[in-house]
Each structure stands twice: as structure tokens, then as C-alpha cells.
Amino acid sequence: MPDVILPVLDEAAAIPGVLAAMPAGYRPIVVDNGSGDGSAEIAAGLGARVVTEPRRGFGAACFAGLLAADAEVVCFMDCDGSLDPAQLPLVAEPIHSGELELCLGARAPRPGAWPWHARIANRVLAFELRRRCGVPLSDLGPMRAARRAALLQLGIRDRGFGWPLEMVLKAAAGDWRIGEVTVTYRARAAGRSKVSGSARGTLRAVRDMGALL
């Protein structure tokens, strides 16, 4: 069954709920990226495998989790409570069946879950992917699944917010079968997203992703 890579930076309030909702057989790997609120200790106390990545950056945390995983199929998911772990099988099944080689969760937002600036930026990036690469995606969603060995062979180099886009770009360049399924997107459990919760965070993500495009 899949390993689930959960990049974490100060998500103490959300971790218990996320881990409790993990489907049977899906093994969480919490990658602590410098938390100061005891996130790593909470995750370990709840039975999750914890990996420490001192180099700050979303991509750095994702890559550390990918190296630590040993399952054939790996999933990635935010650990802020905005995504429902119970929907991970929807994203992983097309990989298990061989229908797709990279599957993303296209977010269906509930009211208040997705700030306007983040939604517009996401739409622009998805449009550019379709226009330039012919990739049939409506959302660069953070819930996704692929085979671990294949991901490592892509050689993703970005260690910041460009990691999710570089994954799709390199998969498209390799003629991977890429698709998406709909998943629920809700307001995070507590606090504010490091990426979409502020205009500054959105601009950082756009900067990193725009450089790759």
C-alpha cells in the first residue's frame, strides 16, 4: 500500500485529525521542515514515521519524504486539514491500475477554503500547462500519487514552491499519462496556509513556478 508524504511546518493543531483519518494501509511519513510547535513529537506520538528536513522549502520536504519512502506507490498531501485523507484511494487507484502514471486531486472548494488570489494564480498556471504541454489538468492540486521509482528518475530539482509544477512538467516531457480526479477542499484546521493563505505566499509560489515555465 502507498506511503503518504506529509510536508509539515507548524501543523500541531491539524496533525491529529489528519493522521486519524488516514485510510487503512496508507502509511504516513511526516516530514518536519523546522517546526517550532512540537509537530514532529505529536506525529511520532501518534505512530507516524517522522523524517526531519532542516533545509527549508516545500520541495525540500517533499523530496526528503520521497527518499524516505519505500512503497511502490507514493502519495503527497498537505497536512493542514484542508484535504481529506479518506480520499487518497481516489488519487492512488489510477496509479495502481495502470490507467495513469501521475494523478492529481482537482480541488472542489467549500466556501472560504480557497482565497481568491490563490485560485486565480492556480487557474493561470493550469491554463499555461494545458496550452504549452497539452496536460489535461484544471488544478495543480497538492494531493497526488505516482510510482516512487519513476518520480526519482524524473530528477526534480526545485526545492521550493516550484516542486509541484516541475513534477508535472517533467512527467509531461516524459510522455507520462497524467490526469486528475475531484477531491474535496475545505478550510484548513487552524492557522493560515504558508502558500495560499496570504498574497505574499501566493506570489512566492507564482515566482517559483513561473521561473520553471
Image (cartoon, rainbow, N blue to C red):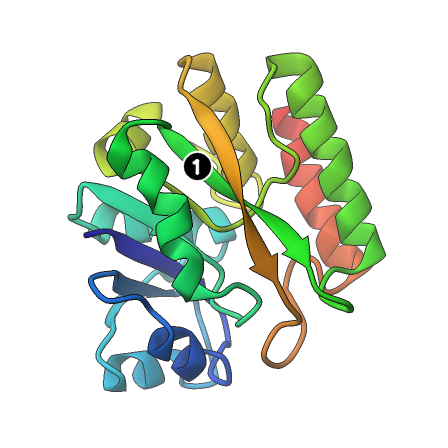
In the image shown, does 93 or 43 lie closer to the viewer? Answer: 93
Q: Is residue 115 left or right of residue 22?
A: right
At 63% from the left and 63% from the top, the residue drawn is 194
Q: How many marks?
A: 1
Q: Quadrant of residue 22?
A: bottom left
Q: Which residue is mark 1?
A: 103
Q: Is residue 147 visible?
A: no
Residue 141 rendering spot, x and y as whole percentages: 57, 46
Q: Is residue 104 left or right of residue 49?
A: right
Q: Is residue 90 above or below residue 103?
A: below
Q: Is residue 151 visible?
A: yes
In the image shown, does 47 or 201 lie closer to the viewer? Answer: 47
In the image shown, does 175 or 95 lie closer to the viewer? Answer: 95
Residue 26 rendering spot, x and y as whole percentages: 25, 60
Q: Is residue 167 left or right of residue 127?
A: left
Residue 149 rendering spot, x and y as whole percentages: 22, 32
**Quadrant in the picture for the C terminus:** top right
At 42% from the left and 13% from the top, the residue drawn is 175
Q: Is residue 211 above or below residue 82?
A: above
Amino acid on which disc 1 is placed: Cys
Residue 6 rendering spot, x and y as whole percentages: 39, 61
